[in-house]
Image (cartoon, coloured by chain):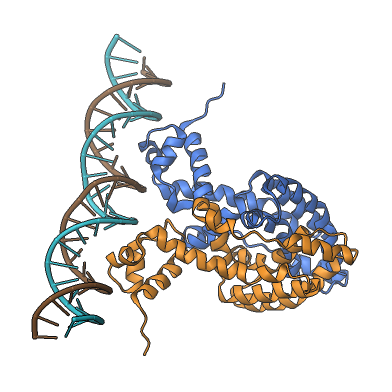
Chain colours: A orange, B blue, C cyan, D brown
Amino acid sequence: MDKVTTEQKIISAADNLFTQKGYAATKTREIADEAGVNLALLNYYFGSKENLYKKVVQEKFRMLLGAIGPLLSDEKVSLEDKIRSITDNYTKLLLENEELPIFIINELTVNKELFKDITENARVVAQPVIDNQLKERNIEMSAADLIVNTLGLTMFPFVAKPLIVSSGLVKEEEFVGFVSERREKILEWIIKTTK
Amino acid sequence: MDKVTTEQKIISAADNLFTQKGYAATKTREIADEAGVNLALLNYYFGSKENLYKKVVQEKFRMLLGAIGPLLSDEKVSLEDKIRSITDNYTKLLLENEELPIFIINELTVNKELFKDITENARVVAQPVIDNQLKERNIEMSAADLIVNTLGLTMFPFVAKPLIVSSGLVKEEEFVGFVSERREKILEWIIKTTK
DNA sequence: AAATGATTTAAACAGTTGTTTAAAAAATAA
DNA sequence: TTATTTTTTAAACAACTGTTTAAATCATTT
Protein backbone atom coordinates (compact mmCIF):
# COMPACT_ATOMS: atom_id res chain seq x y z
CA MET A 1 0.00 0.00 0.00
CA ASP A 2 2.83 2.40 -0.72
CA LYS A 3 1.35 4.92 -3.08
CA VAL A 4 4.04 7.45 -3.85
CA THR A 5 2.37 10.20 -5.79
CA THR A 6 3.95 11.73 -8.87
CA GLU A 7 4.32 15.00 -7.01
CA GLN A 8 6.28 13.30 -4.23
CA LYS A 9 8.52 11.50 -6.71
CA ILE A 10 9.34 14.81 -8.36
CA ILE A 11 9.95 16.68 -5.10
CA SER A 12 12.21 13.93 -3.85
CA ALA A 13 14.26 13.80 -7.05
CA ALA A 14 14.46 17.59 -7.16
CA ASP A 15 15.60 17.64 -3.53
CA ASN A 16 18.41 15.20 -4.23
CA LEU A 17 19.66 16.98 -7.31
CA PHE A 18 19.28 20.58 -6.14
CA THR A 19 21.09 19.91 -2.85
CA GLN A 20 23.78 17.95 -4.66
CA LYS A 21 24.49 20.26 -7.57
CA GLY A 22 22.71 23.56 -6.97
CA TYR A 23 20.01 25.29 -8.94
CA ALA A 24 21.71 26.18 -12.21
CA ALA A 25 23.52 22.87 -12.68
CA THR A 26 20.37 20.82 -12.18
CA LYS A 27 18.41 20.29 -15.42
CA THR A 28 14.68 19.64 -15.56
CA ARG A 29 15.25 16.53 -17.67
CA GLU A 30 17.53 15.14 -14.98
CA ILE A 31 14.87 15.62 -12.35
CA ALA A 32 12.28 13.93 -14.54
CA ASP A 33 14.63 11.01 -15.20
CA GLU A 34 15.57 10.54 -11.54
CA ALA A 35 11.88 10.69 -10.62
CA GLY A 36 11.06 8.21 -13.39
CA VAL A 37 8.45 10.57 -14.71
CA ASN A 38 7.63 12.41 -17.92
CA LEU A 39 9.33 15.78 -18.32
CA ALA A 40 6.11 17.71 -18.87
CA LEU A 41 4.82 16.65 -15.46
CA LEU A 42 7.24 18.99 -13.69
CA ASN A 43 5.48 21.95 -15.25
CA TYR A 44 2.08 20.31 -14.92
CA TYR A 45 2.45 19.98 -11.15
CA PHE A 46 4.80 22.81 -10.22
CA GLY A 47 4.52 25.35 -13.02
CA SER A 48 8.22 26.01 -13.37
CA LYS A 49 11.69 24.89 -12.31
CA GLU A 50 11.98 27.95 -10.09
CA ASN A 51 8.77 27.10 -8.28
CA LEU A 52 9.90 23.54 -7.69
CA TYR A 53 13.18 24.85 -6.36
CA LYS A 54 11.42 27.16 -3.92
CA LYS A 55 9.44 24.22 -2.57
CA VAL A 56 12.67 22.38 -1.80
CA VAL A 57 14.39 25.43 -0.34
CA GLN A 58 11.55 26.30 2.00
CA GLU A 59 11.56 22.82 3.46
CA LYS A 60 15.34 22.97 4.02
CA PHE A 61 15.02 26.34 5.70
CA ARG A 62 12.37 25.06 8.03
CA MET A 63 14.64 22.18 8.98
CA LEU A 64 17.56 24.45 9.76
CA LEU A 65 15.72 27.19 11.66
CA GLY A 66 13.03 25.03 13.22
CA ALA A 67 15.68 23.02 15.03
CA ILE A 68 16.58 25.89 17.36
CA GLY A 69 14.51 29.00 16.60
CA PRO A 70 11.86 28.91 19.35
CA LEU A 71 14.24 27.62 22.01
CA LEU A 72 16.69 30.50 21.90
CA SER A 73 14.18 33.20 22.78
CA ASP A 74 12.64 31.24 25.67
CA GLU A 75 13.55 32.95 28.95
CA LYS A 76 12.83 29.85 30.98
CA VAL A 77 15.52 27.85 29.19
CA SER A 78 18.91 28.32 30.83
CA LEU A 79 22.02 29.27 28.87
CA GLU A 80 23.54 25.83 29.34
CA ASP A 81 20.40 24.16 28.04
CA LYS A 82 20.33 26.45 25.03
CA ILE A 83 23.87 25.62 24.12
CA ARG A 84 23.25 21.95 24.69
CA SER A 85 20.14 22.12 22.51
CA ILE A 86 21.99 23.77 19.65
CA THR A 87 24.83 21.29 19.65
CA ASP A 88 22.58 18.26 20.17
CA ASN A 89 19.88 19.19 17.68
CA TYR A 90 22.23 20.38 14.98
CA THR A 91 24.68 17.53 15.30
CA LYS A 92 21.78 15.11 14.93
CA LEU A 93 20.16 17.06 12.10
CA LEU A 94 23.38 17.55 10.16
CA LEU A 95 24.50 13.96 10.55
CA GLU A 96 21.31 13.02 8.73
CA ASN A 97 21.57 15.91 6.25
CA GLU A 98 25.24 16.62 5.75
CA GLU A 99 24.63 18.70 2.65
CA LEU A 100 22.11 20.98 4.37
CA PRO A 101 24.30 23.88 5.61
CA ILE A 102 26.35 24.13 2.45
CA PHE A 103 23.22 24.14 0.33
CA ILE A 104 21.51 26.81 2.42
CA ILE A 105 24.57 29.02 2.66
CA ASN A 106 25.55 28.72 -0.95
CA GLU A 107 22.11 29.24 -2.42
CA LEU A 108 21.60 32.11 0.02
CA THR A 109 24.68 33.68 -1.56
CA VAL A 110 24.06 32.83 -5.18
CA ASN A 111 20.29 33.19 -5.41
CA LYS A 112 19.68 36.07 -3.03
CA GLU A 113 16.55 37.17 -4.92
CA LEU A 114 14.82 33.83 -4.52
CA PHE A 115 15.27 33.96 -0.75
CA LYS A 116 14.16 37.42 0.17
CA ASP A 117 10.62 36.51 1.17
CA ILE A 118 11.84 33.55 3.20
CA THR A 119 14.59 35.26 5.16
CA GLU A 120 12.47 38.27 5.97
CA ASN A 121 10.23 36.06 8.08
CA ALA A 122 13.11 34.38 9.82
CA ARG A 123 14.47 37.12 12.06
CA VAL A 124 15.68 35.66 15.29
CA VAL A 125 14.57 37.75 18.25
CA ALA A 126 16.66 35.82 20.72
CA GLN A 127 19.40 38.38 21.18
CA PRO A 128 17.87 40.52 23.99
CA VAL A 129 16.87 37.43 25.96
CA ILE A 130 20.34 35.95 25.77
CA ASP A 131 21.99 39.28 26.50
CA ASN A 132 19.95 39.41 29.71
CA GLN A 133 20.90 35.89 30.68
CA LEU A 134 24.56 36.74 30.12
CA LYS A 135 24.30 39.90 32.23
CA GLU A 136 22.55 38.08 35.10
CA ARG A 137 25.47 35.70 35.31
CA ASN A 138 28.11 38.43 34.95
CA ILE A 139 29.46 37.03 31.70
CA GLU A 140 31.14 39.69 29.59
CA MET A 141 30.61 37.96 26.26
CA SER A 142 28.04 39.30 23.77
CA ALA A 143 25.07 37.24 22.66
CA ALA A 144 26.24 37.42 19.07
CA ASP A 145 29.63 35.96 19.97
CA LEU A 146 28.08 33.24 22.12
CA ILE A 147 25.68 32.13 19.40
CA VAL A 148 28.22 32.39 16.59
CA ASN A 149 30.76 30.42 18.64
CA THR A 150 28.29 27.69 19.50
CA LEU A 151 26.97 27.45 15.94
CA GLY A 152 30.49 27.66 14.53
CA LEU A 153 31.95 24.88 16.67
CA THR A 154 28.93 22.70 15.89
CA MET A 155 28.31 23.42 12.22
CA PHE A 156 31.76 24.26 10.88
CA PRO A 157 32.92 20.64 10.63
CA PHE A 158 29.93 19.92 8.38
CA VAL A 159 30.31 23.07 6.33
CA ALA A 160 34.02 22.57 5.87
CA LYS A 161 33.88 18.80 5.61
CA PRO A 162 35.19 18.66 2.03
CA LEU A 163 38.09 20.85 3.12
CA ILE A 164 38.74 18.92 6.34
CA VAL A 165 38.58 15.54 4.65
CA SER A 166 40.57 16.47 1.55
CA SER A 167 43.28 18.00 3.73
CA GLY A 168 43.56 14.76 5.65
CA LEU A 169 42.72 16.30 9.04
CA VAL A 170 39.90 13.81 9.56
CA LYS A 171 39.38 10.75 7.40
CA GLU A 172 36.02 10.22 5.75
CA GLU A 173 35.30 7.09 7.79
CA GLU A 174 36.22 8.85 11.04
CA PHE A 175 33.98 11.83 10.41
CA VAL A 176 30.84 10.58 12.16
CA GLY A 177 32.86 9.70 15.25
CA PHE A 178 34.67 13.02 15.11
CA VAL A 179 31.54 15.19 15.17
CA SER A 180 29.75 12.88 17.60
CA GLU A 181 32.52 13.21 20.16
CA ARG A 182 32.66 16.96 19.64
CA ARG A 183 28.98 17.19 20.51
CA GLU A 184 29.76 16.48 24.15
CA LYS A 185 32.88 18.61 24.30
CA ILE A 186 31.45 21.79 22.79
CA LEU A 187 29.34 22.69 25.84
CA GLU A 188 32.41 22.39 28.08
CA TRP A 189 34.48 24.50 25.69
CA ILE A 190 31.84 27.19 25.44
CA ILE A 191 31.47 27.38 29.25
CA LYS A 192 35.23 27.72 29.64
CA THR A 193 35.32 30.65 27.22
CA THR A 194 32.74 32.54 29.30
CA LYS A 195 34.80 32.40 32.49
CA MET B 1 51.09 53.04 -18.76
CA ASP B 2 48.37 50.73 -17.57
CA LYS B 3 48.24 48.00 -20.16
CA VAL B 4 45.68 45.50 -19.01
CA THR B 5 45.96 42.57 -21.37
CA THR B 6 42.90 40.85 -22.79
CA GLU B 7 43.77 37.73 -20.83
CA GLN B 8 43.78 39.68 -17.58
CA LYS B 9 40.47 41.34 -18.38
CA ILE B 10 38.92 37.93 -19.00
CA ILE B 11 40.38 36.33 -15.88
CA SER B 12 39.22 39.21 -13.73
CA ALA B 13 35.68 39.14 -15.11
CA ALA B 14 35.55 35.36 -14.80
CA ASP B 15 36.78 35.59 -11.22
CA ASN B 16 34.04 38.03 -10.30
CA LEU B 17 31.26 36.06 -11.91
CA PHE B 18 32.35 32.55 -10.92
CA THR B 19 32.80 33.50 -7.27
CA GLN B 20 29.52 35.38 -7.28
CA LYS B 21 27.30 32.88 -9.05
CA GLY B 22 29.16 29.61 -9.35
CA TYR B 23 30.23 27.68 -12.43
CA ALA B 24 26.94 26.59 -13.99
CA ALA B 25 25.12 29.88 -13.53
CA THR B 26 27.91 31.88 -15.15
CA LYS B 27 27.58 32.13 -18.94
CA THR B 28 30.49 32.69 -21.30
CA ARG B 29 28.71 35.65 -22.90
CA GLU B 30 28.40 37.29 -19.48
CA ILE B 31 32.12 36.93 -18.89
CA ALA B 32 32.88 38.41 -22.31
CA ASP B 33 30.51 41.33 -21.66
CA GLU B 34 31.90 42.08 -18.20
CA ALA B 35 35.42 41.91 -19.62
CA GLY B 36 34.41 44.17 -22.52
CA VAL B 37 35.79 41.68 -24.96
CA ASN B 38 34.61 39.56 -27.89
CA LEU B 39 33.09 36.22 -26.95
CA ALA B 40 35.43 34.18 -29.15
CA LEU B 41 38.45 35.46 -27.22
CA LEU B 42 37.59 33.32 -24.19
CA ASN B 43 38.19 30.21 -26.28
CA TYR B 44 41.11 31.81 -28.13
CA TYR B 45 43.00 32.42 -24.90
CA PHE B 46 41.71 29.71 -22.55
CA GLY B 47 40.35 26.98 -24.81
CA SER B 48 37.18 26.36 -22.86
CA LYS B 49 34.98 27.65 -20.05
CA GLU B 50 36.12 24.76 -17.87
CA ASN B 51 39.76 25.68 -18.37
CA LEU B 52 39.10 29.29 -17.49
CA TYR B 53 37.26 28.15 -14.39
CA LYS B 54 40.17 25.99 -13.29
CA LYS B 55 42.51 28.97 -13.59
CA VAL B 56 40.30 30.93 -11.22
CA VAL B 57 39.86 28.05 -8.79
CA GLN B 58 43.56 27.28 -8.54
CA GLU B 59 44.31 30.86 -7.62
CA LYS B 60 41.61 30.84 -4.92
CA PHE B 61 42.95 27.60 -3.51
CA ARG B 62 46.43 28.99 -3.31
CA MET B 63 45.09 31.99 -1.42
CA LEU B 64 43.25 29.87 1.11
CA LEU B 65 45.91 27.24 1.77
CA GLY B 66 48.96 29.45 1.26
CA ALA B 67 47.85 31.66 4.12
CA ILE B 68 48.57 29.01 6.75
CA GLY B 69 49.87 25.80 5.17
CA PRO B 70 53.63 26.04 5.81
CA LEU B 71 53.26 27.60 9.25
CA LEU B 72 51.29 24.79 10.85
CA SER B 73 53.91 22.10 10.29
CA ASP B 74 56.81 24.23 11.55
CA GLU B 75 58.02 22.81 14.86
CA LYS B 76 59.73 26.06 15.82
CA VAL B 77 56.46 27.99 15.79
CA SER B 78 54.69 27.77 19.15
CA LEU B 79 51.06 26.74 19.48
CA GLU B 80 50.02 30.25 20.46
CA ASP B 81 51.74 31.72 17.44
CA LYS B 82 50.09 29.18 15.17
CA ILE B 83 46.65 30.03 16.45
CA ARG B 84 47.41 33.72 16.24
CA SER B 85 48.64 33.29 12.68
CA ILE B 86 45.51 31.45 11.61
CA THR B 87 43.14 34.01 13.08
CA ASP B 88 45.18 37.00 11.93
CA ASN B 89 45.91 35.80 8.40
CA TYR B 90 42.44 34.45 7.74
CA THR B 91 40.60 37.39 9.21
CA LYS B 92 42.66 39.68 7.01
CA LEU B 93 42.33 37.48 3.93
CA LEU B 94 38.61 36.91 4.32
CA LEU B 95 37.86 40.56 5.01
CA GLU B 96 39.33 41.25 1.59
CA ASN B 97 37.73 38.18 -0.02
CA GLU B 98 34.50 37.53 1.81
CA GLU B 99 33.22 35.18 -0.88
CA LEU B 100 36.33 32.98 -0.80
CA PRO B 101 35.36 30.26 1.71
CA ILE B 102 31.84 29.81 0.41
CA PHE B 103 33.13 29.57 -3.13
CA ILE B 104 35.79 27.02 -2.28
CA ILE B 105 33.52 24.90 -0.11
CA ASN B 106 30.60 24.96 -2.46
CA GLU B 107 32.53 24.25 -5.62
CA LEU B 108 34.46 21.55 -3.75
CA THR B 109 31.08 19.95 -3.07
CA VAL B 110 29.41 20.51 -6.42
CA ASN B 111 32.34 20.06 -8.80
CA LYS B 112 34.32 17.34 -7.04
CA GLU B 113 35.77 16.04 -10.31
CA LEU B 114 37.32 19.36 -11.27
CA PHE B 115 39.18 19.52 -7.95
CA LYS B 116 40.71 16.11 -7.61
CA ASP B 117 44.14 17.02 -8.96
CA ILE B 118 44.26 20.16 -6.82
CA THR B 119 43.23 18.66 -3.49
CA GLU B 120 45.52 15.69 -3.86
CA ASN B 121 48.50 18.03 -3.63
CA ALA B 122 47.13 19.90 -0.66
CA ARG B 123 47.45 17.38 2.16
CA VAL B 124 48.30 19.11 5.37
CA VAL B 125 50.99 17.21 7.25
CA ALA B 126 50.74 19.41 10.31
CA GLN B 127 48.89 16.97 12.51
CA PRO B 128 51.82 15.02 14.04
CA VAL B 129 53.71 18.22 14.77
CA ILE B 130 50.77 19.78 16.54
CA ASP B 131 49.96 16.58 18.39
CA ASN B 132 53.49 16.66 19.78
CA GLN B 133 53.21 20.27 20.82
CA LEU B 134 49.94 19.48 22.60
CA LYS B 135 51.48 16.50 24.39
CA GLU B 136 54.53 18.48 25.52
CA ARG B 137 52.23 20.95 27.21
CA ASN B 138 49.96 18.30 28.70
CA ILE B 139 46.92 19.47 26.77
CA GLU B 140 44.40 16.69 26.30
CA MET B 141 42.81 18.13 23.16
CA SER B 142 43.44 16.51 19.77
CA ALA B 143 45.15 18.38 16.94
CA ALA B 144 42.08 17.93 14.76
CA ASP B 145 39.83 19.56 17.37
CA LEU B 146 42.27 22.40 17.96
CA ILE B 147 42.59 23.21 14.26
CA VAL B 148 38.88 22.79 13.53
CA ASN B 149 38.00 24.99 16.51
CA THR B 150 40.42 27.72 15.51
CA LEU B 151 39.37 27.62 11.87
CA GLY B 152 35.72 27.41 12.83
CA LEU B 153 35.73 30.37 15.20
CA THR B 154 37.64 32.40 12.60
CA MET B 155 35.99 31.37 9.35
CA PHE B 156 32.45 30.51 10.37
CA PRO B 157 31.27 34.13 10.56
CA PHE B 158 32.33 34.60 6.93
CA VAL B 159 30.91 31.30 5.76
CA ALA B 160 27.62 31.86 7.55
CA LYS B 161 27.49 35.59 6.95
CA PRO B 162 24.31 35.47 4.84
CA LEU B 163 22.67 33.47 7.61
CA ILE B 164 23.99 35.67 10.41
CA VAL B 165 23.03 38.91 8.70
CA SER B 166 19.63 37.78 7.45
CA SER B 167 18.77 36.49 10.92
CA GLY B 168 19.60 39.91 12.38
CA LEU B 169 22.32 38.60 14.71
CA VAL B 170 24.83 41.05 13.28
CA LYS B 171 23.91 43.91 10.98
CA GLU B 172 25.63 44.21 7.62
CA GLU B 173 27.32 47.48 8.58
CA GLU B 174 28.55 46.01 11.89
CA PHE B 175 30.06 42.93 10.29
CA VAL B 176 33.60 44.23 9.74
CA GLY B 177 33.75 45.41 13.34
CA PHE B 178 32.31 42.15 14.57
CA VAL B 179 34.93 39.90 12.94
CA SER B 180 37.74 42.36 13.66
CA GLU B 181 37.02 42.29 17.37
CA ARG B 182 36.69 38.52 17.33
CA ARG B 183 40.19 38.26 15.88
CA GLU B 184 41.69 39.30 19.22
CA LYS B 185 39.30 37.28 21.36
CA ILE B 186 39.66 33.95 19.55
CA LEU B 187 43.19 33.25 20.82
CA GLU B 188 42.01 33.81 24.42
CA TRP B 189 39.00 31.59 23.89
CA ILE B 190 41.07 28.81 22.36
CA ILE B 191 43.59 28.93 25.20
CA LYS B 192 40.81 28.72 27.78
CA THR B 193 39.39 25.61 26.12
CA THR B 194 42.74 23.83 26.43
CA LYS B 195 42.99 24.32 30.19
C1' DA C 1 56.48 49.04 -48.41
C1' DA C 2 55.32 44.32 -48.37
C1' DA C 3 54.96 40.13 -45.84
C1' DT C 4 54.15 37.59 -41.80
C1' DG C 5 52.09 36.52 -37.66
C1' DA C 6 49.03 37.64 -33.72
C1' DT C 7 44.69 39.39 -32.33
C1' DT C 8 39.91 40.57 -32.87
C1' DT C 9 35.49 40.29 -35.03
C1' DA C 10 30.63 38.87 -36.60
C1' DA C 11 28.33 35.06 -37.82
C1' DA C 12 27.15 30.53 -37.66
C1' DC C 13 27.07 25.82 -35.60
C1' DA C 14 25.08 22.00 -33.21
C1' DG C 15 23.43 20.72 -28.93
C1' DT C 16 20.86 21.87 -24.71
C1' DT C 17 17.64 24.49 -22.06
C1' DG C 18 12.82 25.31 -19.78
C1' DT C 19 8.36 25.25 -21.35
C1' DT C 20 4.14 24.40 -24.17
C1' DT C 21 1.03 21.82 -27.06
C1' DA C 22 -2.34 18.61 -28.46
C1' DA C 23 -3.43 14.07 -28.37
C1' DA C 24 -3.61 9.62 -25.73
C1' DA C 25 -4.44 7.03 -21.62
C1' DA C 26 -6.25 6.40 -17.10
C1' DA C 27 -9.27 7.37 -13.43
C1' DT C 28 -13.67 9.01 -11.84
C1' DA C 29 -18.62 10.20 -12.14
C1' DA C 30 -22.98 9.80 -14.37
C1' DT D 1 -21.79 1.53 -20.10
C1' DT D 2 -21.01 6.35 -21.42
C1' DA D 3 -19.42 10.88 -20.30
C1' DT D 4 -16.22 13.80 -17.98
C1' DT D 5 -12.26 15.02 -15.76
C1' DT D 6 -7.50 14.14 -14.44
C1' DT D 7 -3.13 12.50 -15.56
C1' DT D 8 0.43 11.17 -18.77
C1' DT D 9 2.73 11.20 -23.13
C1' DA D 10 5.69 12.34 -27.35
C1' DA D 11 6.77 15.99 -29.96
C1' DA D 12 7.72 20.52 -30.86
C1' DC D 13 8.89 25.39 -29.57
C1' DA D 14 11.98 29.26 -29.24
C1' DA D 15 15.63 30.85 -26.67
C1' DC D 16 20.11 30.02 -24.96
C1' DT D 17 24.42 27.34 -24.46
C1' DG D 18 29.68 26.69 -25.38
C1' DT D 19 32.39 26.53 -29.29
C1' DT D 20 34.15 27.08 -34.09
C1' DT D 21 34.88 29.35 -38.43
C1' DA D 22 36.70 32.40 -41.75
C1' DA D 23 37.45 36.89 -42.67
C1' DA D 24 39.13 41.41 -40.95
C1' DT D 25 42.21 44.23 -38.35
C1' DC D 26 46.33 45.19 -35.97
C1' DA D 27 51.25 44.86 -34.78
C1' DT D 28 55.78 43.31 -35.94
C1' DT D 29 59.45 41.96 -39.02
C1' DT D 30 61.86 41.89 -43.34
Lateral position of residue B93 relative to residue B195, left or right: left
State the residue at coordinates (66%, 43%).
B96
Task: Give the answer, above or below, for where B186 lies relative to C1.
Answer: below
Give the image quarter of residue B41.
top left
Residue B78 visible in this rendered orientation of the protein: no
Is D25 placed above or below B60 here?
above
The residue lying toward the viewer, choosing from A154 and A7, is A7
Front residue of B187 and A4: A4
Task: Give the residue at x 55% y 61%.
Answer: A104
Image x and y of residue B8, in percent = 51, 35
Compared to residue B158, the image places residue B173 above or below, namely above
* Residue under the point 36% across and 84% down: A3
Residue at 43% from the left image edge and 53% from the top image edge: B24
Give the quarter of the figure containing the N terminus of chain B. Answer: top right
Figure quadrant of residue B146: bottom right
Is A3 situated left or right of A159 in this image?
A: left
Quadrant location, the C terminus of chain B: bottom right
Q: Position of residue B76 (x, y in %)?
A: 82, 57
Q: Position of residue B80 (x, y in %)?
A: 84, 58
